[in-house]
Image (cartoon, grey):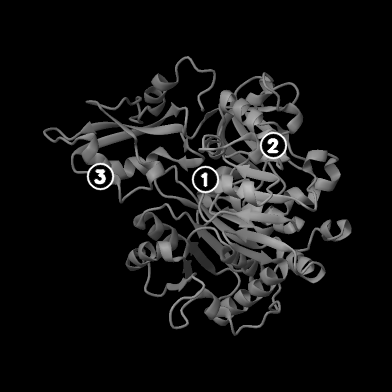
Amino acid sequence: MMSQSTMESSTIGLPTVIGEHARHRPDAVALICGAQETTYAALHRNSCRVANALLAEGLVAGDRIGYLGHDSARFYELVVAAAHTGIVLVPINWRLTVAEIAHVLLDSGCKLLFVDAGREAAAASALPEVSTELVLRRMDLAGTAGAGFAAWYADQPDTPPQSAVSRFDPLLQMYTSGTTGKSKGVVIAQQSLFAVRDVRHESELAWLEVPEDDVALVVIPGFHIAGLAWVVQGLIDGIVTVVLPEYTPGLSLEAIRTRGVTAVYAVPIMLALILVEPGVRPADFGKLRLVAYGGSPIPEDMLAQCMTQFGCEFLQFYGMTETATPITFLPPDDHWVGNPRLRSAGLPYRGARIQVLDRNGKPLPPGEVGEVVVHGPAPMVEYWRRPEATAATLIDGWVHTGDAGYLDTDGYLYISDRIKDMIIVAGENVYPAEVENVVVSHPAVREAAVVGAPDERWGETVHAFIALVPGQSVTPHELSLFLRDKLASFKRPQHFVFIDFLPRNASGKILRRELRDQFWQGRERAVN
């Protein structure tokens, strides 16, 4: 692995780190994806060729390229190649519909789109809505008549391109669901992927150390910042990282059993589903030292079951795409059954600060609920081409999260609600306005309001309250069929409630909170 002094540099970038690993440990495995193992030498060599191929296409720093497909070593070659060149990579959620994919491509201005075989039809369908200038590149290894990804870069030099790229330049553009009906591109600098590692040696916390023989399994997909960041963190540390093309409980369990996995990074529901796989037994997790989880709250009963059955240390992290790096951690020492702090999101990480503000922007004392705002070591650069939204969210370096919560007297953060009405379904963010805009496009629907209701398996499910056009009718089944090709499955309402009129305040704004509260009465907090 790289020396401590080398890794402590505040200017070294991802390509240099990979190059150092390749030089000193060329045959060490960097990534395992399915049956394919990629060494650090191969990752370095291939990412250099990809970078040179991108530049040969005429792309320059600041241009956007997209990736639509499942996680693979090829995807992370693109990540490192983008870091080589200053080109910004836009990972696209492959669960999105054609219309949603088209929005991301159009909004980002992607000039090149890499797509795997499973999503090629969706990409082709999205192209007419975007631009005839957008070029598709297939990610399959073989391809036909030289059309494959490997053939595309095969003739390029395997040495780093000559480019002046700063670690503080944009590297990623991750799309989040939009509070106003359209998803926003969150621009993230390469520095954000180093932020946690940069201050790790200053923290003197044993649970932050990464053993040289660690084998990490990351089951959060790379189109989420948490999944991508954990994989890149493994590459920075020089360990083996197992990446699933697609999360399934069975594939996850198989990887843990057969790959000697020592650390797992997941959304809570993913952990719970692994534990109910047929034939699962405690011996399967004998090599695990750590399970890190985040992305959505976790019921205490579920957490207790996971701690018991996985039989290792647990670590919770809290952050969001806009913070680009975890802001708080609930350490292993706080993970014991019955500890009231299991309901918290933990303490700020070194280099991060948290405040809870009232409606006037004034800090609140411990125990009082307000909006959680965070100052992290490397927050987002901006919302792409949305200066007003950027100014409203990123104020003097503080990210206004839209989460409601409070701090206790010891500085632990507790999340109690979501100010912006966001719904979290199995770790996926769903914003009501985006769903409502599609629902009301049905000719029989006059207006709609979408809220989240608690669900013990998925955390929350989407409920839609529907007011119909007078004289029109539609059934829940018909609405479900109507929405099938217009919204990703996790965004589609699971329940429809028909009412005459939606509740509104004096200014005409729909009172989602009034509709939502009926599902949450009697609960200590309004997230599940």
The correct choice, above or below, for 508 with respect to 35 in the image is above
Identify the residue shown where x is 46% and y is 65%.
Answer: 116
Give the alpha-carbon distance from disc 3 to disc 1, as whole Å. Answer: 29 Å
Name which quarter of the figure residue 444 lies in. top left
The correct choice, above or below, for 106 with respect to 528 in the image is below
Mark number, residue 250: 1
Give the alpha-carbon distance from disc 2 to disc 3, as whole Å. Answer: 41 Å
Identify the amino acid type marked 1: Gly
Q: Secondary structure at mark 1?
A: helix
The correct choice, above or below, for 177 with respect to 314 in the image is below
User: Mark 2 or mark 1: which comes first in sequence?
Assistant: 1
* Mark 1 nearby-residue class (10 Å; few <14, some 14–19, many ≥20): some
Name which quarter of the figure residue 335 lies in. top right
User: Mark 2 or mark 3: which comes first in sequence?
Assistant: 2
| Percent of width and height locating residue 300 | 59, 24
Q: Label 3 belongs to which residue? A: 481
Q: Label 2 belongs to which residue? A: 328
| Percent of width and height locating residue 323 | 63, 45
Identify the amino acid type marked 3: Leu
